[in-house]
Image: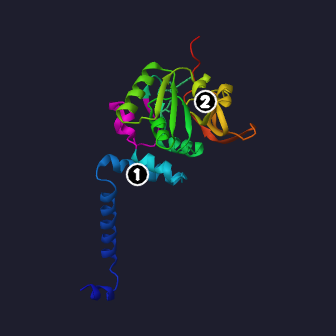
Amino acid sequence: MNGLMKHRPHNPSRLASCAILAISVSTLLVADDPITLQRERMVTDQIESRGVRNQDVLQVMRSTPRHLFIPTNLRSMAYEDHPVPIGHGATISQPYIVAFMTELLAPAKKHRILEIGTGSGYQAAILGQLAAEVYTIEIVPELASSAARTLRDLGYSNITVRQGDGFKGWPERAPFDGIILTAAPPEVPSALISQLAENGRLVAPIGSTWMQELIVIEKKGDGTISRRSVCPVKFVPMRQADK
Ligand code: SAH
């Protein structure tokens, strides 16, 4: 009967129902539970559609359980297109911003990365799957310990969380191939530039409480520094440690 079907004129309603069937079968193949489906949609609709192309970044955004980094009462918002509060005045960044900053940082499997502003630990988890080692500093003790617990429970074993002041960086573990700030200082802290490896890259929101620019700093092999602005952003300000 297949041969006969080939010679029939196309029936548009049959084509439409075939297309619907094809979509639902592919959805079933890609996502067998609602959370996986939400994550697929987050990557396609919020991240790929806005131009993030790095396949490794897209892959870890697809597979990392973002909802488990968010307080239980707000988990239903985990895959929505905005930041979500995680307590203590902190937020887990919008999924697109996490992906975009990760793409700008360009972590590689042999890299050692420093993050300032652990928050929930989600950005660190993304970086941990793309780099050799991640060191992350959080100033709020409760957030540092809950992020460390989440990361440990989920088995991210190459990420070390420290409670402390990110302005000072982590000199004992320097130099870093990549440094990412997820809280905004008024200027790039000089300690962080000095802890950047040759050919290393720093990605940070820089500016006032209300207006910041996402910037990328590169340290060349001869030690010279280049700096470019990427776009306006809005992050929580970086806090000064109590003296
Ligand atoms: N990267 C986080 C989002 C962090 S929000 C995530 O994936 O969830 C910014 C975080 O920076 C907050 O948790 C805030 O407490 C922290 N922070 C603010 N000032 C800091 C400082 N001086 N040193 C380290 N962390 C700081």
Which quarter of the rendering shows the N terminus?
bottom left
Which quarter of the rendering shows the C terminus?
top right
> Is 39 within the magenta?
no
Image position, residue 105 (x, y; %): 59, 42
Distance between the alpha carbons at the discs numbered 2 and 1? 37 Å
Q: Quadrant of residue 157?
A: top left
Q: Nearer the viewer, residue 154 or 2?
A: 154
Q: Which residue is mark 2?
A: 174
Q: Is residue 210 left or right of residue 139?
A: right
Q: Which residues are magenta?
A: 64-85
Q: Nearer the viewer, residue 113 or 211?
A: 113
Confirm or reject: label 1 Cβ below 8 Å from ligand 1: no
Identify residue type, mark 2: Ala
Q: Which residue is mark 1?
A: 41
Secondary structure beneath disc 2? Answer: loop
Near mark 2 (Cα within 10 A), the count class, few <14, some 14-19 or many ≥20, is some
> Is 69 within the magenta?
yes
Of mark 2 and mark 1, the one earlier in the sequence is: 1
Q: Is residue 67 left or right of residue 140?
A: left
